[in-house]
Amino acid sequence: QTALATQNYRAALALADAALREENEANPNFASTLNGLRALALFGLKDHAQATGLLGDFLNQSRPRAADALLLARQLRLLGVPTQARMVYEHACTVDPLNQAALAELVRLDAEAGDRARLAGNLPKLLRLRKPSRAALEETLLCLDQPGDSALREQIRDALRRASATPAP
């Protein structure tokens, strides 16, 4: 992760490859996590074909850890591959429909991309959760600037009003 953070993608790939060759039977998620790290390194090296295959390996694991999925998706966004980040967030939401962090990021991506159809599907899911992220709602509201967005804007405003009316614990 340090090599990835410093954008030393070749070193990150070499370290992940070496770790993958070791015996890792004690942790069944380890190989999947390493495939996620390898995918990040390859996206950084602009080898999108191989990176996409490794990302598929990560997603095909029955249930990747939520923290691993969120970290991977955030890094994918930073690397400028939002479509792949969206795949990871969608997978995290499919595996755990109550994963509020993943759903909030999915809503942000939908709003930033201007994907009103997906936003109309994902926003109500986020609003049904216990306490949706105020920041995600406010950022999404700023992106909804089309005349046809009035229903979505009103849903967000209602949620923000309810959150403001709720006293702090």
Image (cartoon, rainbow, N blue to C red):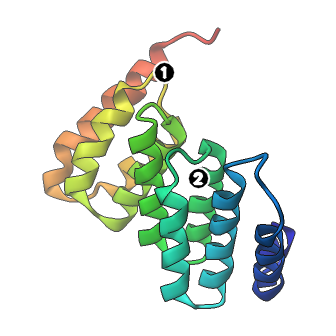
Residue at the disc numbered 2: 69
What element does badge 1 sit on?
Answer: helix
- The spot of residue 133 in percent (x, y) is 51, 36
Please name the amino acid that badge 1 sits on: Ser
Among the 4 quarters of the image, the one containing residue 78 = bottom right
Q: Nearer the viewer, residue 85 or 39?
A: 39
In the picture shown, does residue 95 fall above or below 44? above
Q: Using the image as rendered, state which of residue 158 and residue 5 is in the foreground.
A: 5
Q: Residue 159 versus residue 95: which sits nearer the camera?
A: 95
Q: Position of residue 153 (x, y in %)?
A: 27, 42
Mark 2 or 1: the one toward you: 2
Residue 6, percent from left and from top: 83, 77
Is residue 79 in sight in this rendering? yes
Place residue 4 in its image quadrant: bottom right
Q: Reading the chain from its start, which is encountered first: label 2 or label 1?
A: 2
Picture residue at 42% right of the left edge, 61% below the top: 87
On the rendered image, what quadrant is the C terminus found in? top right
Label 2 – label 1 distance at C-alpha: 31 Å
At label 2, the amino acid type is: Ala
Tell me what residue is drawn at x 46 percent, y 36 percent.
96
Q: Nearer the viewer, residue 15 or 164?
A: 15
Taking the image as shown, residue 4 lies to the left or right of residue 63, namely: right
Q: Residue 3: where, in percent of width, then height?
A: 84, 75
Residue on which the image places disc 1: 164
What residue is rendered at 69% in x and 68% in y?
37
Secondary element under disc 2, as helix, strand or loop, is: helix
Classify mark 2: residues with Cα within 10 Å, few (<14), some (14-19) or many (20+).
many
Q: Is residue 127 above or below residue 3?
A: above
**Is residue 69 shown above or below 20?**
above
Mark 1 Cα shell of 10 Å, populated few (<14), some (14-19), many (≥20): few
